[in-house]
Image (tube, grey):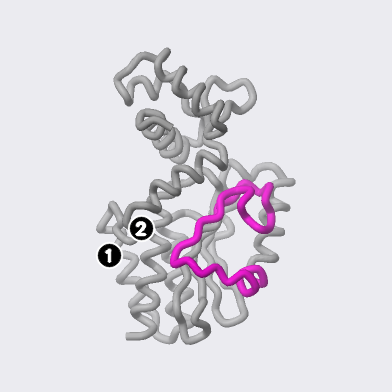
């Protein structure tokens, strides 16, 4: 993939997350200061590579799971604990510290992630999975289809035992669309941060949202939440 193609893919991922509609070549041409024909040629290469696709008869393109994975790998190579918006960083840090007992601290942090990311928030507390923000998740345009909602529900029903058995060991893990072990057709992305808590050395906090989301911001916030929780719970 060329640098320009990488930049075009990044722009498509970020624009699609913002507007929830396929991204056309004319918009990309304006962003990059080149002709629409040049953009169409580059988008055709990205499509042949499986990074973007054309839904139905729309003239625009949307990222595929492969495109999102490539984008996330690039984002993950950057520092995931340094949010672009320091105001949001301060809000998260302040909310984590106002918890009291560990369970309340974790719940409060999840609720804050829900507020800041507009996704469903979740965390393991002992042998239980605390979730908040279901209305955020099912309010997304992706989940109008009842079949997809059923897939999401199946994922949520099986998430806690899967986390306990699989015990992901990375500080930050991102499961995009079909990469999810359960509900692979749900069109969801699970972003989780591992942290130490009084309940377990492998506790998890994170979000579940549509594959169309602001990965850079959400990954940063989830990673930060895990770090802040560990610091507060063991300070």
Indicate the position of residue 118 as horizontal and vertical percent values: 47, 54
Taking the spot 66% from the left edge, 54% from the top edge, the residue there is 152
Left or right: 80 as drawn, with respect to 22: left
Residue sitting at x 39%, y 24%: 28
The span from disc 1 to disc 2 (Cα, nearest Å) is 16 Å
Residue at the image point whose x is 40% and y is 53% from the top: 76
Residue at (44%, 22%) from the top-left corner? 42
Q: Which residue is mark 2?
A: 80
The answer to whether residue 163 is above or below residue 21 is below
Residue 232 drawn at (x, y percent):
35, 80
Residue tagged by mark 1?
90
Magenta span of residues = 160-189
Please say whether residue 100 is visible from this viewpoint: yes
- Kindly indicate whether the residue at mark 2 contacts the one at mark 1 (C-beta within 8 angstroms): no
Residue 124 place in picture, x, y as percent: 55, 74
- Picture coordinates of residue 122 (x, y %)? 53, 67
On screen, residue 46 above or below 10: above
Q: Where on the picture, by quarter, is residue 168?
A: bottom right
Q: Residues within 10 Å of mark 1 (few under 14, many from 20)?
A: few
Q: If the image is split into quadrants, where does the C terminus sit?
A: bottom left
Above or below for 148 versus 224: above
Q: Is 60 included in the stretch rendered in magenta?
A: no
On the image, which quarter does residue 49 sit in? top right
Number of the front mark, 1 or 2: 2
For the N terminus, the image quarter is top left
Of marks 1 and 2, which one's residue comes earlier in the chain?
2
């Amino acid at each position: 993939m060329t640098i320009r193609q990488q930049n075009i893919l990044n722009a498509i991922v970020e624009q699609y997350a913002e507007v929830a509609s396929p991204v056309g070549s004319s918009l990309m041409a304006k962003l990059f200061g080149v002709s629409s024909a040049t953009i169409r040629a580059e988008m055709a290469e990205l499509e042949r590579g499986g990074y973007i696709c054309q839904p139905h008869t729309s003239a625009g393109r949307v990222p595929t799971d492969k495109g999102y994975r490539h984008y996330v790998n690039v984002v993950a190579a950057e520092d995931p604990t340094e949010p672009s918006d320091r105001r949001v960083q301060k809000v998260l840090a302040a909310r984590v510290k106002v918890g009291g007992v560990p369970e309340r601290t974790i719940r409060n942090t999840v609720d804050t992630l829900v507020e800041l990311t507009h996704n469903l928030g979740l965390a393991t507390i002992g042998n239980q999975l605390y979730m908040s923000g279901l209305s955020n998740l099912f309010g997304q345009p992706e989940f109008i289809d009842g079949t997809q909602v059923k897939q999401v529900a199946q994922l949520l029903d099986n998430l806690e035992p899967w986390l306990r058995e699989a015990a992901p060991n990375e500080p930050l893990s991102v499961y995009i669309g079909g990469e999810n072990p359960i509900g692979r057709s749900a069109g969801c992305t699970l972003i989780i941060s591992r942290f130490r808590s009084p309940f377990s050395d492998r506790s998890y906090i994170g979000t579940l949202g549509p594959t169309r989301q602001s990965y850079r911001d959400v990954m940063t916030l989830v990673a930060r939440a895990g770090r802040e929780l560990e610091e507060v719970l063991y300070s």
